[in-house]
Image: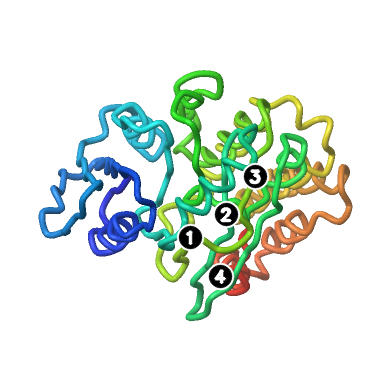
Amino acid sequence: MTTCGRPELLRKAVRSIINQTYVGVIEIVIVFDKIPVDELEDVETLPRRKIITIPNSRTPGLAGGRNTGILAASGEIIGFCDDDDHWHPEKITQQLNTWNNVPEAVALASGIDIRTDGTNIIRKPPEEVTFDDFLRSRVTAIHPSTMLYRRHDLTGRIGLVDEQLPAGYGEDYDLLLRATRFGKIHSNPEPLVGVLWDRPSFFAGRWENIASGLTYLLRKFPEFERSPKGVARIAGQVAFAHAALGERIQARRWARSALHRDPTQLRAYAALIVSTGCVNAAWLVKAMQKVGRGL
């Protein structure tokens, strides 16, 4: 778990992991990024639970923080949890039962329960997702706070989180793509993680980082060219980011590229509308989040 300053939400997240029904040992490694380490002395723990608090010793940001945690962890299985999310009590038990049934899975995910605009929305991922699936779609129901990986995969064939990504944007998607080069991700469809959208996002409004991160991913994975819909999806997102920045020429160029590959790409149309100045990008994003979707 990486945090840069949400102490109350952090404590809720930590307690949700402490209170897992899983009877084995759980080690909670909390990495403090660009802020002083909080020892969390007020959080009561339980037998077979251990809290470790350390500073980020690598690149500042989420990617470096996660890698610091991965390398500091001693367990065979690594799970991620954002500091504003929380795990349902049965998460680890149910996911490890699934892994026993499909030991060939490269990683595990689960459904999510999104809290947004005062309501809860359930998102259920497919039971299995391949590399080609992720080229076509981000499959946003597969959330980073649900993921379990084998530690030796993250320090070996898959590799650590990419710290070269501009501002760390898209690091979870990059990791999913690299992981599924070695096998499928299997999911427990039921929601095992609560995801909080009723709060400001650290990426909200940082359109330049979004455009740079997604452009980086297109260059990093040449396989996208075999999925026109996948390229169009990302091009539409880049177009929207440029439109939000007021960069009309760039927005329209990326939108045309997206629509050339997929005339049904709605993000490209949204970018064109925003580029006219008639619709505010932040308003449109907020409207989408109310129904549990993002742009």
Q: Quadrant of the N terminus?
A: top left
Q: Residue at x 55, y 62 (%)?
A: 112
Q: Which residue is mark 3?
A: 186
Q: Residue furthest top?
A: 156
* Placement of 188 over or under 1, stated as above or below: below
Q: Residue furthest bottom?
A: 118
Q: Position of residue 121 (x, y in %)?
A: 58, 72
Mark-to-mark CA distance, 3 and 4: 30 Å
Counting residues from the start of the chain, the first of labels 4 and 1 encountered is: 1
Q: Which residue is mark 2?
A: 110
Counting residues from the start of the chain, the first of labels 1 and 2 encountered is: 2
Q: Position of residue 192 (x, y in %)?
A: 51, 60
Q: Position of residue 42 (x, y in %)?
A: 12, 59
Mark-to-mark CA distance, 4 and 1: 22 Å
Q: Which residue is mark 4?
A: 286
In the image, 49 versus 122, the foreground residue is 49
Mark 1 vs 2: CB contact within 8 A: yes
Counting residues from the start of the chain, the first of labels 1 and 3 encountered is: 3
Q: Which residue is mark 1?
A: 193
Counting residues from the start of the chain, the first of labels 3 and 4 encountered is: 3
Q: Secondary structure at mark 1?
A: strand
Q: Quadrant of the C terminus?
A: bottom right
Mark 1 vs 3: CB contact within 8 A: no
Q: Amino acid at mark 3?
A: His
Q: Amino acid at mark 1?
A: Val
